[in-house]
Image: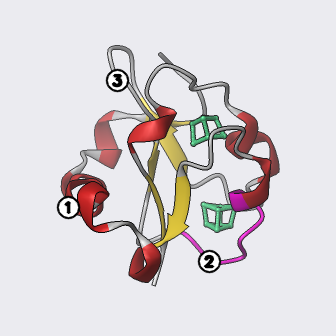
């Protein structure tokens, strides 16, 4: 399992989740419209979930049906070409 950032991050993207992630697994690169949690690095600690001001973060098995594309996006994102943190 991993946690997933969904569409509500778009337009807010304040980096609050980045500040609390103990393993620096939340990534972005210039031009991104939201942040991405690397599912291979996320340790499911849930620290990021309550700090998001727009409730954009869910465990992957609790992502709302109308946000399911963000699960696939997180799986396909090119983490090697981005860096942990808010780099947009
Ligand atoms: S659940 Fe924990 S490890 Fe995963 S992205 Fe959130 S803060 Fe980081
Ligand atoms: S805390 Fe929420 S709105 Fe802020 S960057 Fe993280 S996912 Fe986006």
Question: Around disc 1, counting alpha carbons within 10 Å, would you say few (fewer than 14), some (14 to 19), or many (20 or more)?
Answer: few
| Up/down of 23 relative to 18, above or below | below
Residue wearing tag 2 = 43
Q: Position of residue 87 (x, y in %)?
A: 52, 21
Magenta-highlighted residues:
42-49
Q: CA distance from mark 2 to mark 3?
A: 23 Å
Q: Position of residue 35 (x, y in %)?
A: 46, 38
Q: Which mark is residue 24?
A: none
Residue wearing tag 3 = 32
Asked if ligand 1 lies within 8 A of label 2, the reply is yes
Judge left or right: residue 86 versus residue 9.
right
* Residue found 41% across the figure and 49% down from its top: 6
Taking the magenta stretch, the answer to whether it contains residue 30 is no
Looking at the picture, the colour scheme in use is secondary structure
Secondary element under disc 2, as helix, strand or loop, is loop
Q: Position of residue 32 (x, y in %)?
A: 34, 23
């Amino acid at each position: 399992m991993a946690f997933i950032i969904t569409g509500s991050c778009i337009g807010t993207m304040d980096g609050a989740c980045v500040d609390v992630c103990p393993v620096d697994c939340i990534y972005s690169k210039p031009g991104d419209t939201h942040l991405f949690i690397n599912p291979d690095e996320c340790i499911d600690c849930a620290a990021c979930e309550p700090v998001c001001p727009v409730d954009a973060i869910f465990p992957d098995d609790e992502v709302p049906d109308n946000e399911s594309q963000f699960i696939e996006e997180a799986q396909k994102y090119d983490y090697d070409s981005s860096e942990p943190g808010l780099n947009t």
